[in-house]
């Protein structure tokens, strides 16, 4: 197929890892140290339109209406080179990306961004990739994007090379009442990127080997809990997995953490709710914000307690969301 003569637009949603990816075996191809498992969310997504055009002298990339320069531009151009190589073309592209993350969310993610870009750019280049191949392509932009090709519960099989490291769906349509309450505790950009943070953990944490072992076990347990609709096991193991990921960072040399004081306060509040009989569990990514896994009947109690502590605007409720879609308008 030939490159398209009009822009191709794709939408992908962000995902929250229940069994985390925190370390690479291969930095260039983004092959992880362990398989990971996530839930794609409905509330936070990215729309990206791409067209390859003869007349462009360079890739032209806008993000939320602003022309990107420097690092942001380079990262996307490097990704577009992978697409150009696959399609056997050399044209530059115009890329127009809009992030639909509530303005105050502080949850912007490269997962939805590179999943949407993989979909739009590959199709605009004339490629018709399978979902698995789209996930492998998204992986080249950012590891977590591998899983955002799929809706609901999805996994990333770590594999050992470009072919064997791909995403796949576990339960695309989630037919039980799971909700995720996100609490925004800090909106400013993090000082240590995920890429730097996980590199430091692999290189210096004395516990890294134990992380790989336990994450591998967690993957199987959470996968079975999803099949059994066993929310307590799913939540408990996800919370433990997140805490172990953050323990890697505390045990790195030099030690670092993404937590702030509010993060610890929020964790305490979730533990209090659990002690009061509400099944809810927290998970935390490479930033101070908390995401609380719960079932629908507990949402009101979780939201009320967190709003009282951190303000109404800091709390957002999300549900399982869809995988990559193409948009025609
Ligand atoms: C995850 N995170 O599994 C983990 C848990 C954050 C904490 O994947 O270097 O942006 O581009 O592959 O995917 C965030 O890291 O890192 C991430 P790169 P990415 O969702």
Image (spheres, rainbow, N blue to C red):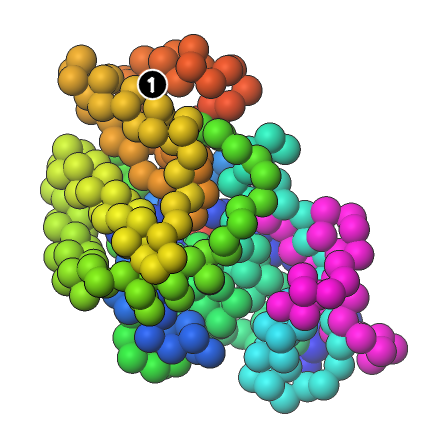
Residue 182 placement (x, y as % from top left): 43, 31
Q: Quadrant of the N terminus?
A: bottom right
The image quarter containing residue 136 is bottom left
Q: Quick one: 175 or 214, which is closer to the camera?
A: 214
The residue that mark 1 highlights is: 302
Left or right placement of residue 188 versus residue 184 in this view: right
- Say above or below: 316 vs 277: below
* Image side of residue 96 versus residue 134, left or right: right
Outermost residue to the bottom:
88
Q: Residue at the spot x=50%, y=36% of the render?
A: 43
Q: Position of residue 313 (x, y in %)?
A: 55, 20
Find numbered disc 1 in the image and state the secondary structure of the residue it sits on.
helix
Kindly identify the residue that appears in the image at 52 percent across and 33 percent down: 186
Q: Bounds of the magenta span?
A: 46-75
Give the vertical position of 128 relative to 231 (above or below).
below
Locate residue 257 relative to residue 298 in the image: left or right. Answer: right
Name the residue at 76% across, 76% down. 92
In the figure, residue 203 lies in which quadrant?
bottom left
Look at the picture and state if 58 lies above or below 262: below
Q: Is residue 144 magenta?
A: no
The residue under the point 39% across, 46% down is 257
Would you say residue 8 is visible in this rendering?
Answer: no
Where ligand 1 lies, by quadrant?
A: bottom left
Residue 95, percent from left and from top: 72, 62
| Residue 290: image location, x then y, percent | 39, 33
Left/right placement of residue 206 relative to residue 134 reads: left
The quarter holding residue 293 reads top left
Q: Nearer the viewer, residue 112 or 287?
A: 287
Determine crowd level at label 1: few under 14, some 14-19, many 20+ residues with C-alpha closer than 10 A. Answer: many
Is residue 268 at least partly visible in the picture? yes
């Amino acid at each position: 197929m030939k490159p398209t003569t009009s822009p191709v637009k794709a939408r992908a949603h962000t995902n929250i890892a229940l069994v985390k990816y925190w370390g690479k075996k291969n930095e260039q191809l983004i092959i992880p140290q362990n398989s990971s498992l996530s839930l794609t969310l409905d509330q936070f997504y990215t729309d990206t339109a791409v067209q390859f055009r003869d007349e462009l002298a360079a890739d032209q990339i806008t993000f939320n209406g602003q022309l990107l320069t420097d690092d942001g531009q380079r990262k996307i151009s490097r990704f577009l080179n992978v697409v150009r190589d696959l399609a056997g073309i050399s044209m530059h592209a115009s890329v127009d990306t809009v992030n639909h993350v509530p303005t105050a969310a502080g949850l912007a993610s490269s997962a939805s961004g590179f999943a949407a870009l993989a979909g739009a750019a590959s199709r605009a280049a004339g490629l018709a990739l399978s979902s698995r191949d789209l996930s492998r392509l998204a992986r080249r932009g950012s590891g977590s994007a591998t899983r955002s090709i799929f809706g609901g519960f999805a996994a990333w099989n770590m594999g050992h090379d470009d072919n064997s490291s791909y995403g796949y769906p576990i339960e695309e349509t989630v037919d039980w009442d799971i909700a995720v309450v996100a609490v925004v505790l800090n909106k400013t950009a993090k000082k240590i990127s995920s890429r730097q943070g996980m590199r430091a953990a692999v290189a210096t944490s004395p516990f890294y080997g134990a992380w790989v072992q336990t994450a591998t076990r967690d993957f199987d347990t959470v996968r079975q809990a999803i099949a059994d609709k066993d929310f307590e096991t799913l939540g408990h193991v996800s919370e433990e997995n997140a805490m172990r990921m953050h323990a890697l960072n505390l045990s790195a040399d030099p030690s670092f953490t993404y937590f702030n004081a509010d993060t610890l306060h929020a964790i305490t509040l979730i533990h209090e709710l659990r002690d009061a009989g509400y099944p809810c569990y927290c998970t935390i990514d490479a930033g101070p914000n908390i995401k609380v896994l719960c079932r629908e009947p507990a949402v009101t109690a979780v939201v009320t307690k967190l709003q009282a502590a951190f303000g109404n605007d800091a709390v957002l409720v999300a549900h399982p969301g869809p995988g990559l879609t193409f948009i025609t308008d």
